[in-house]
Image (spheres, helix red, strand yellow):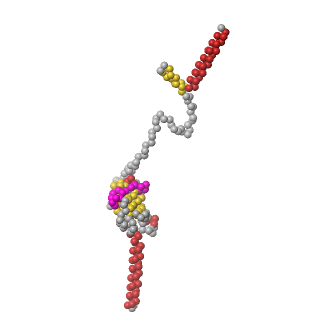
Amino acid sequence: MSTSVRVRTVRRRAGVVAAAIAATLLLATPASAHVEVGSEGARALAENVTLNFDAATESDAAGITKLEVFLPKGISPADVTYGKGPAGWKLAPTDKGFTVSGPPVAVGEDVTYSVVVRQLPDAKSLVFKTLQTYDDGRVDRWIELEESSGGHGHGHSAPVLELKEAAPGAEPVAPTPSASPTPSATPSPSAPPTTEPADAKPSATPLPLLRAEEDGSSSTLPLGIGIGIAVLALAGGGLWWFLKRRRSGTA
């Protein structure tokens, strides 16, 4: 083989290698960004565990302002307290997890923060899906799972925490107490029921009562009986008046 042919062959091979390296770097660039979670010696059912999160930026024009985390099954928002993070950032619980947010960090700067979990669930691994928001409105969705993407995701894998087996004798603690509901008004013992059972039969309506007072004492009579007495008294008075007039006329 001539020298010129060898030179062309070497150049051709060098070009192929360079192209392969460039392609590898190009494909690796978007996957270099990430959100990761870690905890030294984390194991199932461990209590008061500090979780450290690291959120890499993917923007060269805006700063990160918020990270929203969706908690895995077995951890409630009430079980999470804030550890530390960027200056001015705070934690706020949500229906399905929590957010850590505050003033935007510097452009190109990653965010590192920590939270303390009351107790980790009895599991082999925990997935913490995360939405990462920038001050220009951009949102990176770190929610993909390896098994669901089939290895063909877009480099936005959700952070996963691997757990060791629970320590001997470890048991789940009681759930974190939640806010007690507002007590409802207790009905007065003397108040009549507002509803009746479906099979209740209508009862006879009692007669209204008529109260008669005499010499400081009182008695209670049904109104119907009182009216009857009054009618009889009037009838008796009329009869007495009629008889009196008749005797006067015949005298």
Residue 25 to residue 235: above or below: below
Q: Main secondary structure of the magenta part?
A: loop
Image location (x, y in percent) of residue 54: 36, 63
Point out the stretch of residues depicted in magenta.
82-97
Q: Residue at x 56, y 28 (%)?
A: 207
Image quarter of the N terminus? bottom left
Q: Residue at x 39, y 74 (%)?
A: 25
Would you say residue 11 is visible in this rendering? Answer: yes
Would you say residue 145 is visible in this rendering? Answer: no
In the image as oriented, which residue stretches furthest toward the top? 251
Q: Residue at x 41, y 62 (%)?
A: 133
Residue 199 as seen in the image, left or right of residue 27: right
In the image as oriented, which residue stretches furthest toward the bottom? 2
Q: Residue at x 42, y 68 (%)?
A: 155
Residue 44 to residue 21: above or below: above
Number of marks present in the image shown: 0
Image location (x, y in percent) of residue 50: 33, 58
Nearest the eye: 214 or 31: 214
Image quarter of the C terminus? top right
Based on the picture, tell me whether residue 180 belongs to the magenta stretch. no
Based on the picture, tell me whether residue 85 belongs to the magenta stretch. yes
Image location (x, y in percent) of residue 32: 38, 69
Quadrant location of residue 141? Answer: bottom left
Image location (x, y in percent) of residue 146: 43, 65
Residue 215 to residue 125: above or below: above
Residue 199 to residue 171: above or below: above
